[in-house]
Amino acid sequence: MQGSKNSEKYLIREATAEDISGMLEVFNYYVENSFAAYLETSVGPEFFQAVQSEKEEDENEYFPFYVIEERGKIIGIGTLRPYFPFPNFRHTGVVSYFILPGHTRKGLGSRMLDKLCTEAREKKMRSLLANVSSKNEASLNFHLKHGFIECGKFREVGTKFGYYFDIVWLQKFLEENQK
């Protein structure tokens, strides 16, 4: 019963231009306060406006941003992007999502991942990749719990808050027989 109440309370939908300020609030929180977003300085509206212009250019090749909304407030964002922009890599995508503190551990990350997996299957993708900072144990554990396997690590490739960090690549096959 609790799960259905949460489902009704939160809406996952495609982002619109009107959502950009809320999307910035979510993303910039992680830029300023954690290793989840790799940037060291906050971004402005142009960061997400570029995505909207991609949609206008080619609807068939478009990969949307999604938002998680609670009572009109954006509390999470997520996206599926191509791994490489070359046709021979079209079967692999990269997922990314951020949910504001206070809204984590409520199944929203799982719901967003399910949404992105569904979209990936519709685009005939076979596997998904996620790259996660080695300093972000919660995200590493989340991905492992949801069927991702560690497939690579780049050591000390980034710095933030005066610390070096590794990038851990994880992969999830969308169908069991594709491993």
Image (cartoon, rainbow, N blue to C red):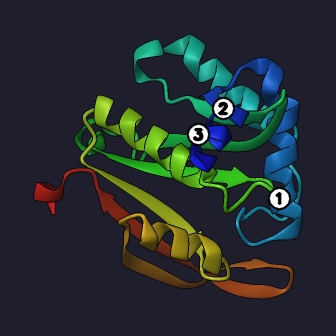
Quarter of the view holding residue 114: top left
Say if residue 143 shows up in the picture: yes
x%, y% of residue 110? 52, 53
Q: Residue furthest left?
A: 177
Residue at the image point whose x is 38% and y is 67% from the top? 148
Residue that label 2 marks? 8
Mark 1 lies on a secondary structure that is: loop
Residue at the image point whose x is 28% and y is 41% from the top? 125
The N terminus: image quadrant: top right
Give, as a three-letter code, the residue at label 3: Ser
Whichever of callouts 3 and 1 sits on the residue coming sooner in the sequence is 3
Residue that label 3 marks? 4
Which label belongs to residue 102? 1
Mark 3 vs mark 2, CA separation in Å:
6 Å
Q: In the image shown, does 54 or 25 lie closer to the viewer? A: 25
| Left or right placement of residue 140 versus residue 42 in this view | left
Say if residue 45 shows up in the picture: no
